[in-house]
Amino acid sequence: MAMPTHIVAVGGIVENDQGDILLVKTQHDGWVFPGGQVEVGENLSDALIREIEEESGIACVVSQLIGVYSNTCMYKWHDGVTDVPTKLMLDFICRPVGGSLQTSEETSEVSWVQKEKALDLIQSPAIRTRFQAYLDFEGAVTYMDYVTKPDFVIKLERKI
């Protein structure tokens, strides 16, 4: 029996003491909150801390789970050849504890943005939806099942 293959990823909405949000600009998705894939043998918190620091230069602590998302479509990567499997993404609120803003191989810009202006920069429908869930967060974790290709469509949304 073949085991299923899914990507497990984490996203971090890092808010500083002034209420600003950490955003990074990527080649393919534009402005997003930082995050990425969990590597083999890595736990979710360590993966998120690593991804945020790699993409932005900011060290942080993970505070609270706010969203669980299933992207249940498969699609071709930006190279047009590689199949991207379904994804499970977990979003967390994070707090910065050090470091300084710096770009990386994955990011061309890094910035603290006023919370109210973040959606003006975020263009990806899935990232906008997940950031809106953060803005609307009142203690219950959001669960969504969506597809991003060929168009972004939310198939299920509920609080858990």
Image (cartoon, rainbow, N blue to C red):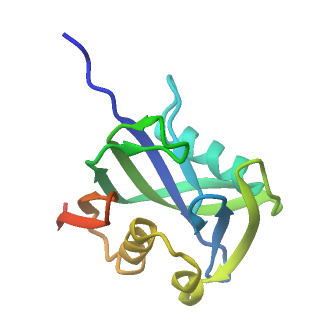
Residue closest to the far front: 80
Q: Where residue 149 sits in the image (x, y, percent)? A: 33, 57
* In-front residue for pair 86/97: 86
Above or below — where is 128 with respect to 81?
below
Say which quarter of the image contains residue 15.
bottom right
Quadrant containing the C terminus in the rendered view: bottom left
* In-front residue for pair 10/84: 84
Quadrant containing the N terminus in the rendered view: top left
Above or below — where is 84 with respect to 139?
above
Residue closest to the far top: 1
Q: Where residue 2 sits in the image (x, y, percent)? A: 24, 14
Residue closest to the far bottom: 116
* In-front residue for pair 1/14: 1
Residue drawn at the location 36% of the way across and 73% of the way down: 133
Residue drawn at the location 67% of the way across and 64% of the way down: 24
Q: Where residue 108 sits in the image (x, y, percent)? A: 76, 61
Say which quarter of the image contains residue 131.
bottom left
Above or below — where is 105 with respect to 124?
above
Image position of 64 (left or right of 39): left
Q: Tag count in the figure?
A: 0
Residue drawn at the location 51% of the way across and 40% of the way down: 37
Q: Where residue 69 sits in the image (x, y, percent)? A: 31, 55
Residue drawn at the location 25% of the way across and 66% of the way down: 153
